[in-house]
Image (cartoon, rainbow, N blue to C red):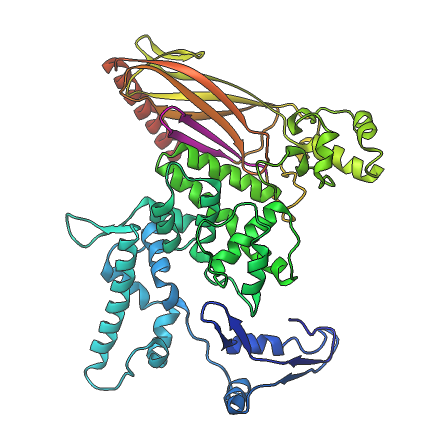
Amino acid sequence: MSFSHVPAGDHGSTEYYDGKTHRYVDFPITDVLQMMGRAGRPQFDDSGKAVIMVHDVKKNFYKKFLYEPFPVESSLLNVLADHLNAEIVSGTISSKQEALDYLTWTYFFRRLLVNPSYYNMEPLSNNTNEQQTLNTYLSAIVQRSLDELIRATCIFVNEDDQRTLQATVHARIASHYYISYRTIHMFAQRVTSNITLGELIDVISCAYEYAEMPVRHNEDELHKTMIDRIRIPFRTQPQFDSPHLKANLLIQYHLSRLEFPRIDYVTDLKSCLDQIIRIIQALIDLCAHKALLSPCLLCIHFLQMIIQSRWITDPDILTLPHITDRSFTHIFSSHLCQLIDIKHETLTNILQSHLTSTQIDDIYEYLMRLPQIELNFNIRGFWSTGEETRQLPTNVHADQEYTLQIKLKRINRIRRNEFRQLTTSSVNKPKDESWIFILGNTDTGELICIKRFNQIIRSHTTVSLSFVTTNILGRQRLTLYFLSDGYLALDQQYDFIIDIESPSLQTQVNTELDSLVDELDKRLAALQ
């Protein structure tokens, strides 16, 4: 709420409707102070007037806190488990005692000594029990947070010394992508090898990051009408005042490009999309850790859908600017990847009766900026004859590390300084092109390895993808996926055959020696 255009601000209420508790609750005092600060025109007025209308019983309360200095309290206690998780991952904290010592250096500890009742601790006195009360309180909140992390499979206690705290992969994913330990734990429980798109949207919308999504008064009634327009219906009876249901609706409305019944939903959608990218990225890493090929591909495709604000089942030409009507699909007989090389004159002849020349120019520029990537690859590793680079298909040894050497060539007719920017007609925030390589076995559904590539793909680029062959002998069909994290319908997929032979002791020794030589070279380079 902004009153920057008037010299006086009128804040009519100090309450808002909380959909979770089904009642009106007070705004935080700091929010009221911020709204008061909007009275007057910045850099123009010397003074401003703010009028706050409250119930008579609350008048003295607001007078006290608005006219007297308001102490700033710590919010660490509410997110202590997530904070400890990040510090354990970084190695700053490795035991409960170190966690206690760490807390004594925080602002939370300083405010705890001054205002203990705010943090639900017994008031401190000057007697001998003061230190014991403080230690008991700190020990309790740290132990409670550590227990929560253990139950969420984010950390575990070393079995040898029964005191060292160690982080799991779940903890590292949560810390890296700045998501709650509750979210990564829920993902680990609900993501299965046969998850569907509808289930994936439900899982993401149930993330703890959306627990505070505002559900305003009467929005539950709006949700009952909005639910009739979504593409993937709910399988169970929805709770219309749930913030997670609202997040689900926002996501589906975004993908369908539907109009919201209120302008407030546009703001809510922006808040939802600000977090969803890192949530999906965390989910991709979790699927890769669990070696789930199909769910990982589904997450990447969902990320593409979010960036382009289109369903993957929609005609791909609907991602073009100004092409919003399905009637255009009858005009274009080609797919998006086949239109990249279209000439401007041909495009104009097709669309001149439907769009303006400026709109046609926008579409042509969009098509010219789409990445055209040519991909070739071979395999490198050790065989009985030594280290070689071979063409596929070929024979390989079991339980042996090999590397796919992938050569990329960009063939766009475009200036190099324009390569980096991802082209999209729906996302306002600038985003760089990024690519994901996945090697998987579609017969078993196993994801063998994954690699993100965030560098610019220019005229010639080489990427290495290392993997270890299985100990199961025989012929295997593997698939290499080359995926964009932002474009729909531009993915590439290559199947190839390898014949796995008996393991070779000589090749394994050569591989280990080669790794030792590389490590030695790195250390020598670091010393120079």
Q: Main secondary structure of the magenta part?
A: strand
Residue at horizontal 23 percent and vertical 72 percent from the top: 135
Relative to 19, 328 lies left or right = right
Up the image or down, 117 lies above or below 247; here it is below
Residue at horizontal 61 percent and vertical 75 percent from the top: 35
Relative to 390, 123 lies left or right = left
Dividing the picture into quadrants, the one containing residue 410 is top right
Q: Which residues are magenta?
A: 433-453
Percent position of residue 341, x then y: 71, 24
Percent position of residue 41, x then y: 72, 75
Up the image or down, 364 lies above or below 309; here it is above
Q: Is residue 274 visible?
A: no
Relative to 72, 353 lies left or right = right
Residue at horizontal 59 percent and vertical 58 percent from the top: 225
The quarter of the picture where the C terminus appears is top left
Dividing the picture into quadrants, the one containing residue 381 is top left
Q: Is residue 316 visible?
A: yes
